[in-house]
């Protein structure tokens, strides 16, 4: 059906009353604002048309449904069938509701759970009553308070008993399998730096948490298709908008824009987000803010490419990417190369600029409640972004107000912090998981932690009896759902479900240990050291021995070059295609052609490669490439890293070579001369230096 859960509630009331009902009465019954009810009803006509029913309104009196009795009964039947799912689905939904409450005991409002399961708040309220008995057996109580939400009350001991029981009852069911495969995004940790070194720390933390709560409840596939960076950008935009409203800084309405955007295919999603925010914060979201949310969604949609995307969108995306390259040069020439390689930054800026240009083009004002703090705390970043604003004015004629400069400062500032963090010496943290509930629970915790920490930690599961002195010597700390005594290592006690507070505690420890040197290399198992050294030596030897230099026609196209190179790199057609597609994907994110240094760097992580490789392509006459794609450069460098568990080790080796391209003029000079042996000798010499340094770090 085309009706949201709340809209179904409204229609059910209208059909059961069968008379004129005031908007205020509807709002009171479903516990939302009058404006929310009016919004929900704005675009209902098309959905009602197939039932031959019409919504009628009379100013100052109320609304009602007009149509034949049989048609209204047909609508009522469909609404009830949609909202009260068959008993099998109902039981499954209630089990999942128990799981959601166990996963996060912080108060959540009914709309939150209604969004997750796609049913009305009335249905969720009934579900809450139905599952109360399950919690009562553990002396736990579901507390529901107006304006507070729903929360679980009881002792920690009883909560753990409930968790254990739920897992035992559902360990082999689809519910638990879905949980272990849940790709949760720790948005707070991505946005905020716990050490306080991040421009995003200017954002109100509590408002940010509540906004994230809203988004976690909205399971719309259009949000799930956004890249993590675009998703974070949308959350930041909404958080700042909510701050504006809480501070009563209202943006001037733009009726022409509102009329145009209200017909957009994604307007319903923006409306859904706005309605959820109204309930979470108990505020009223102006229509112009809904329009701004929609503009940001439309900008973010450029980040994923599917078969339905318009050619105009692709052209617009390409133009924006080219402009971003120029913007980065204006911002800081010294940092430009590194910033252009930061996919997270480029993608986030891409999503931000499209709605920004729409605002500037239409002379739309926007308030930035963080502007004063940005100018005071990060004056250097703001000053550089003023140059970027002047560049936008010069290129497009748009006057860029300071409020927009503030938003740009947040993007550039966050990218600068990431660059600094990458330069810090960090290592992978070794963590052990100990759980008494059996291998099933240990693996569930392992899966969730691996998805959460990604490449930052090596995680191993153990039984209590496995914790020998030799094992403990290898670990930085343990995570356990049971009490461990006489253990000479730090232990973090957690719930078997790893709730948000557990993950935050673990995250803090990982950040700390990542910057703390590992115990002396002499404490390490010598055989493990040998394995690491042997792996690095093998990879380096492979890169040197397999180095290729291609000489091609200066008229070769980008596509033809990819085909020619991959035919030499692998005999398998499926792997060739994977490499080609991954290089193209990387190129779509940000241009890898660097005319300032006279070369193109086509680098990617790909499952098409089984070993790292470094190759060079020049023309037969050592002249420039004529294809416009290559922008007159004299060399194309191809760097491939296998998409496997050794990504970090291979990345460090390749990162050393790529840095030499910029730092040492001799490297590029030898490449431009096109003499394979001399280039190969240079690579050998540099990787020897890298390996000697690596031995000191093992």
Image (tube, grey):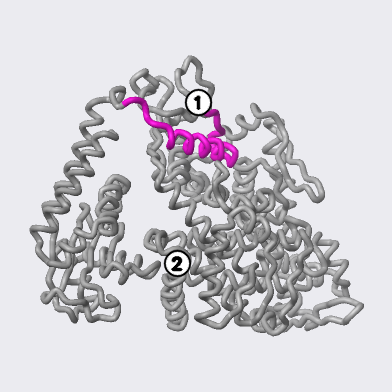
CA distance separating discs 1 and 2: 45 Å
Query: Tag 2's secondary structure?
Result: helix
- Residue 86 shows up from this direction: no
Within the image, what quadrant is residue 57 found in? Answer: bottom right
Q: Is residue 207 above or below residue 48?
A: above
Residue stretch rendered in magenta on the structure = 492-520
Q: Which of 332 and 364 is in front in this view?
A: 332
Within the image, what quadrant is residue 666 found in? Answer: bottom left
Foreground: disc 1 or disc 2: 2
Where residue 211 is drawn, which disc sits there? none
Q: Give the mark, 1 or 2, whose residue is nearer the N terminus.
A: 2
Q: How crowded is mark 2: few (under 14 residues within 10 Å), some or many (20 or more)?
A: many
Q: Nearer the viewer, residue 221 or 231?
A: 231
Residue 63 part of the magenta-drawn span? no
Q: Is residue 354 above or below residue 209?
A: below
**Position of residue 6 measured from the top left corner of the image (x, y, whole percent):** 72, 65
Q: Mark 2 points at which residue?
A: 328
**Position of residue 486 measured from the top left corner of the image (x, y, whole percent):** 48, 14
Where residue 491 is drawn, which disc sits there? 1
Residue 506 part of the magenta-drawn span? yes
Which residue is at 33% across, 25% downward? 520
Q: Is residue 531 above or below residue 216?
A: above
Residue at the far top in the pictured view: 486
Within the image, what quadrant is residue 382 found in? Answer: bottom right
Which residue is at 76% across, 71% downward? 11
Which residue is at 49% across, 51% downward? 417
Q: In this view, does 486 lie above or below 371?
A: above
Q: In which quarter of the image is the C terminus?
A: top left
- Residue 279 shows up from this direction: yes
Query: Tag 1's secondary structure?
Result: strand
């Amino acid at each position: 059906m085309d009706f949201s859960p709340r809209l179904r509630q409204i229609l059910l009331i209208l059909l059961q009353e069968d008379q004129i009902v005031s908007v205020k009465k509807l709002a009171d019954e479903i516990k939302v604002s009058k404006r929310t009810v009016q919004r929900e009803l704005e675009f209902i006509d098309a959905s009602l048309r197939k039932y031959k029913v019409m919504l009628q309104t009379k100013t100052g009196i109320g609304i009602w449904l007009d149509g034949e009795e049989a048609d209204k009964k047909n609508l009522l039947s469909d609404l009830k069938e949609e909202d009260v799912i068959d008993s099998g689905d109902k039981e499954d939904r209630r089990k999942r509701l128990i799981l959601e409450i166990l996963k996060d005991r912080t108060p959540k409002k009914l709309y939150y759970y209604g969004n997750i399961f796609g049913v009305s708040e009335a249905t969720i309220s009934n579900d809450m009553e139905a599952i109360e008995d399950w919690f009562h057996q553990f002396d736990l109580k579901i507390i529901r308070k107006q304006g507070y939400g729903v929360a679980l009350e009881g002792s920690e001991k009883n909560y753990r008993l409930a968790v254990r029981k739920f897992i035992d009852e559902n360990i082999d069911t689809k519910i638990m399998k879905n949980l272990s495969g849940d790709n949760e995004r720790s948005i707070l940790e991505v946005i905020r730096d716990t050490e306080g070194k991040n421009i995003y720390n200017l954002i109100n933390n509590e408002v940010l948490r509540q906004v994230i709560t809203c988004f976690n409840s909205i399971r719309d596939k259009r949000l799930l298709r956004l890249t993590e960076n675009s998703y974070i950008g949308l959350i930041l935009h909404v958080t700042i908008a909510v701050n504006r409203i809480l501070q009563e800084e209202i943006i001037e309405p733009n009726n022409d824009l509102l009329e145009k955007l209200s017909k957009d295919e994604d307007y319903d999603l923006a409306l859904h987000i706005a309605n959820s925010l109204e309930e979470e914060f108990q505020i009223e979201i102006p229509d112009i803010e809904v329009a701004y949310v929609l503009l940001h969604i439309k900008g973010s949609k450029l980040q994923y490419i599917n078969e339905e995307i318009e050619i105009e969108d692709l052209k617009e995306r390409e133009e924006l990417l080219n402009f971003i390259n120029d913007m980065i040069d204006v911002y800081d020439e010294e940092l430009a190369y590194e910033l252009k390689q930061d996919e997270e930054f480029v993608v986030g800026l891409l999503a931000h600029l499209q709605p920004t240009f729409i605002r500037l083009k239409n002379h739309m004002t926007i308030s930035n409640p963080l502007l004063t703090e940005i100018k005071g705390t990060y004056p250097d970043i703001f000053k550089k972004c003023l140059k970027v604003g002047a560049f936008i004015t010069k290129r497009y004629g748009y006057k860029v107000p300071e409020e927009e400069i503030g938003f740009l400062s947040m993007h550039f500032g966050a990218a600068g912090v990431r660059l600094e963090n990458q330069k810090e010496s960090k290592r992978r943290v070794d963590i052990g998981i100990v759980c008494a509930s059996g291998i099933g629970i240990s693996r569930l915790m392992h899966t969730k932690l691996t998805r959460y920490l990604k490449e930052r930690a090596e995680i191993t599961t153990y039984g209590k009896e496995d914790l020998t002195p030799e094992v403990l010597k290898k670990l930085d700390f343990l995570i356990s759902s049971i009490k461990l005594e006489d253990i000479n290592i730090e232990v973090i006690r957690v719930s078997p479900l790893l709730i948000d507070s557990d993950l935050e505690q673990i995250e803090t420890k990982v950040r700390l240990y990542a910057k703390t040197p590992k115990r002396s290399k002499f404490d390490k198992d010598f055989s493990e050291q040998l394995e690491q050294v042997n792996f690095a030596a093998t990879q380096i030897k492979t890169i040197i021995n397999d180095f290729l230099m291609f000489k091609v026609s200066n008229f070769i196209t980008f596509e033809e070059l990819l085909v020619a190179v991959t035919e030499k790199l692998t005999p398998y057609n499926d792997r060739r295609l994977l490499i080609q597609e991954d290089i193209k994907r990387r190129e779509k994110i940000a241009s890898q052609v660097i005319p300032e240094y006279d070369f193109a760097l086509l680098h990617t992580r790909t499952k098409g490669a089984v070993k790292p490789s470094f190759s060079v392509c020049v023309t037969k006459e050592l002249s420039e490439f004529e294809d416009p794609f290559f922008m007159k450069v004299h060399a194309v460098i191809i760097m491939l890293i296998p998409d496997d568990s050794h990504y970090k080790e291979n990345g460090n080796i390749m990162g050393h070579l790529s840095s030499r391209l910029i730092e040492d003029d001799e490297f590029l000079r030898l490449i431009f001369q096109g003499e394979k042996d001399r280039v190969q000798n240079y690579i050998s010499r540099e990787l020897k230096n890298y390996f000697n340094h690596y031995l000191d770090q093992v």
